[in-house]
Every structure is written in structure tokens, then in C-alpha cells.
Image: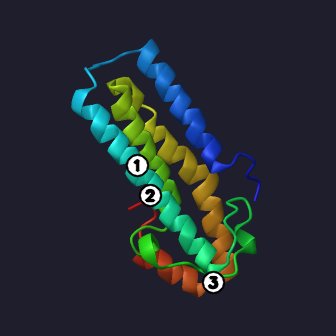
Amino acid sequence: MELKIPPPVYLLIFGAAMWWLADALPILSWEPGLSLSLGWALAGCGVLIDLSALWRFIQAKTTINPHRPMEANALVVEGMYRFTRNPMYLGMLLLLCGWALVLASLSSFLLVPLFVVLLTQVQIKPEEIALVQLFGDEYQEYQKNVRRWL
């Protein structure tokens, strides 16, 4: 795989860019109020999903390194992996959506779809190719039964 940037770095870059965009281009801004609480709650859910998914990898004693999927020695399909093939990335997405609510500006939401497209292209698709090579029919069956995001 030719991946060079770890997914958490993308998360931080997008989070910072959303913060900048909310300040520089405050399209449809609102007073935080309820969105502040909802935003932190949604971000917290994203973190819990990430930790839950990470725990499943630790339990399976397989690699958590997103740049080395070929080192995986187990296909994890329990827990959140029953509903999404990428709960860690889904958790990051929820964290960014929560952050956008905290920022209280519609402009901050503009980067969320770009995060999904970028992560799908540069991280998820290469991972899937590696996992098909590694786990073959078992992973392809999993792909048929479980959606990529949700």
C-alpha cells in the first residue's frame, strides 16, 4: 500500500480546517446552545465507537496499523463490525459531525463529505484490496453482507 498519512492525521487536519472555515466563512451560523451539547455527545459517541472497534482488534490479536492490513491475522466481524466494515472511520466521521455542531456554523459541515470521499479513496479501498488478497472469499462474503460505512 502506498498510504503515507495515518487516518487520525486526516481527522486532525479536517477538524482544524472546519474550525478555520467556521470562523472565516460563517455561513448560517447560530448560537451554540443545544448544538453544543449535541455536538459533544455525538463526538463522544464517535470516540466510543472508535475505542470499541479498537478493542475488538486487540482481542483478536491482529494489527491495528491502517497502513499494514496485510499483517492482519484475523478478520474481525463482531461488535460494530456486524454493522459497518469500518467502524473506526465511522467513529471519526461522527466525531467530525459533532465538532461541526460545536462550531455552530453550516460552513463547517461542508468538509464532512470531502472527508468521507477522501478516506474512502486513499484508505478504505486500498485496505479492501489487501484484505481480499489476504482473506479471499471470506472477506468478499463479508463485503456482500456488511456495508462499507453504515
The image's mark for residue 48 is 2
The amino acid type found where label 2 is placed reads: Leu
User: Which residue is at the far bottom?
Assistant: 137
The image's mark for residue 1 is none
The amino acid type found where label 3 is placed reads: Gly
Q: Is residue 22 left or right of residue 117?
A: left
Q: Secondary structure at mark 3?
A: loop
The image's mark for residue 136 is 3
Q: Is residue 4 above or below residue 99?
A: below
Q: CA distance from mark 1 to mark 2?
A: 6 Å
User: Which residue is at the far top?
Assistant: 24
Q: Mark 3 near mark 2, Cβ–Cβ under 8 Å?
A: no
Q: Is residue 86 visible?
A: no
Residue 116, given in percent of the width and then of the height, sits at 48, 47
The amino acid type found where label 1 is placed reads: Gly
Q: CA distance from mark 1 to mark 3?
A: 35 Å
Q: Which residue is mark 1?
A: 44
Q: Secondary structure at mark 2?
A: helix
Residue 121, given in percent of the width and then of the height, sits at 58, 51
Residue 83, given in percent of the width and then of the height, sits at 39, 71
